[in-house]
Image: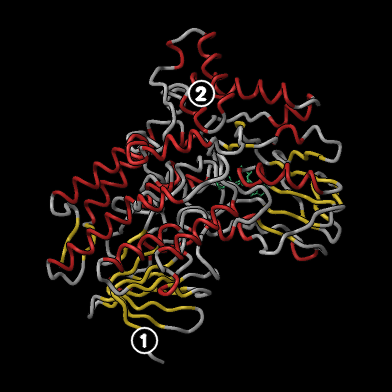
Amino acid sequence: MSTHQFDVIVVGAGFSGMYLLHLLRGRGLKVRVLERGSDVGGTWYWNRYPGARCDVESMEYSYQFSEELQQDWDWSERYAPQPEILRYAGHVADRFDLRRDIQFETNVSAATYQDDTARWRIETAEGEVYDTKFFIMATGCLSSTNKPQFKGANSFTGPVYHTGSWPHEPVDFTGKRVAVIGTGSSAIQCIPQIAAQAAHLTVFQRTANYAVPARNGALDPELRDAIKANYPEFRAKAKQVRNGLHYPLNDVATMSVSPEERQAEYQFRWDRGGISFAGAFNDLLLSAEANEVAADFVRGKIRETVNDPKVAELLCPKSVIGCKRLCVDIDYFETYNRPNVTLVDISEAPVEEFTPAGVKAHGEVADVDAIVLATGFDAMTGSLLGVDIRGRDGQTLKDKWAAGPCTYLGLSTAGFPNFFMVTGPGSPSVLTNMLPSIEQHVEWISDLLHATLARGAQAVEPEAQAEEAWVEHVNALAGRTLYPTCNSWYLGANVPGKPRVFMPYLGFPTYVAKCDEVARNGYSGFVFS
Ligand code: NA7
């Protein structure tokens, strides 16, 4: 068997892998991207469920590394639907001729650092072997589906779908009885669409979720032109905001204004639509009192919208708002007014089992023809630990991270030389607009690769001390907020047995400043050997 030799092997052809390929290839490196899907797009390739759409506005959820690209591409809606984002990814792949260096339908199974040569040996499930100097996981934060092991799972006679690995051909629910398990972001997007098509929809809800209206619609051409007229400035402003998003952040504490002013601010944002609701005041996730006021506003809206008071009460979340990712919905709560929708509360007693006819909870079986698992992902670490990654002296990443992920800057981990992650745990990633975060990571990693080669070094890796300090810093930031108070996937709390550690870094601008400082100081915290 021949071994293919590369300078860089990248795993994943989503937005991270595509930009890595473009940038590193342009800088003269021999790069190969290995991708399990049959085309580019990453999360947008897999999440094809009805209603899938980005919760970041389309004018922001795009690359900015090429002015020509951002000028040429036109989005059709305020929030881009999944098929359009996938077309955009395809357009980028065509435009920069990326596919010739991407190997599709290739599942990386193992990656082993060779101490003697300071190179990585990459193996695929298809039996191929690659030898590379640098190894980069660009596998995304939400790529490994969470499929709970329901008792009797195989006994159900109908199809079972997961929102995160939806079939490529359209699924027709017309005339069908459907169960949806889960009420996270994916469920909140697909429930109204499925309800509109199905004969009956039964939703199994373990935890009620906050959602704010998207107010989606055709993209206003005047707004689009105004942004395009000054795109770089628009992008630069967004980078000053803690989540990298260009939205109005009201730098005022909740309780410092009168109740009337507070209501007016919340209402303004409710009417405006989207996650800028979270920016109504500056202490949403810092003060429990402030949070409760905002939560109460949303609960009031749910009660106004849902006709049946009992159903409305079940849909009213009790937890901290924004602690889990705030969902952006289109007619979600309204859907519960439909006569063909039933809500089953499983907060006290879980789904008991799947039977041949359907889903059993509270001793009763809901007879259905199809089940949709909208049960989320083994987020942030699932895909990284899904590959048997072994660093210096054969240490596995799984062992190293047994008590939770440890990284330096969310990009690298001690004991694993020449190995990098894009949007890894300990980076701002999922708490920001992913595209600018990805671009920042990719450009920073690319510079570090070049600095390594320029020094004639064989390997680069973080110092254990720098990593420990970073992990402490990430935890300390989260500890000052309300984020650790709920069972979110940010903490790994949605996957049984996963260590409870807050994984994303809070604050895009401070993160970027830190990365710049590290680079300016000759990559402080890294060892070149
Ligand atoms: P989420 O947000 O993790 O939601 C998953 C949902 O599935 C959530 O309501 C879970 O309830 C529920 N769930 C998970 N396991 C079970 C079991 N065993 N029984 C019943 N219900 C269960 O994933 P999404 O795909 O919706 O969204 C992920 C991200 O994608 C989102 O944040 C956006 O960034 C895009 P729980 O709340 O854990 O009680």
Answer above or below: position of 122 versus 363: below
Mark 1 or mark 2, whichever is nearer to me? 1
Q: Is residue 348 left or right of residue 212?
A: right
Q: In which quarter of the image is the C terminus?
A: bottom left
Q: Which of 143 and 230 is in front in this view?
A: 230
Q: Which of 486 and 424 is in front in this view?
A: 424
Identify the residue at horizontal 82%, vertical 58% (top origin): 355
Residue 488: x, y in percent? 53, 42
Kind of element beneath mark 1: strand
Identify the residue at horizontal 78%, vertical 40% (top origin): 344
Identify the residue at horizontal 59%, vertical 37% (top origin): 328
Residue lying farthest bottom? 1
**What label sits on residue 523 in the rendered view?**
none
Answer above or below: position of 255 versus 521: above
Residue 349 seen anywhere in this rendered image of the structure: no
Task: Tell me the crowding category of disc 1: few under 14, some 14 to 19, or many 20 or more residues within 10 angstroms, Cα based.
Answer: few
Q: Nearer the viewer, residue 213 or 342?
A: 213
* Residue marked by disc 2: 291
Kind of element beneath mark 2: helix
Residue 335: x, y in percent? 76, 36
Q: Mark 2 and mark 1 in contact (Cβ < 8 Å)?
A: no
Residue 155: x, y in percent? 80, 65
Q: Quarter-wise, where is residue 128 in the image?
A: bottom left
* Residue marked by disc 1: 3
Identify the residue at horizontal 81%, vertical 40% (top origin): 341
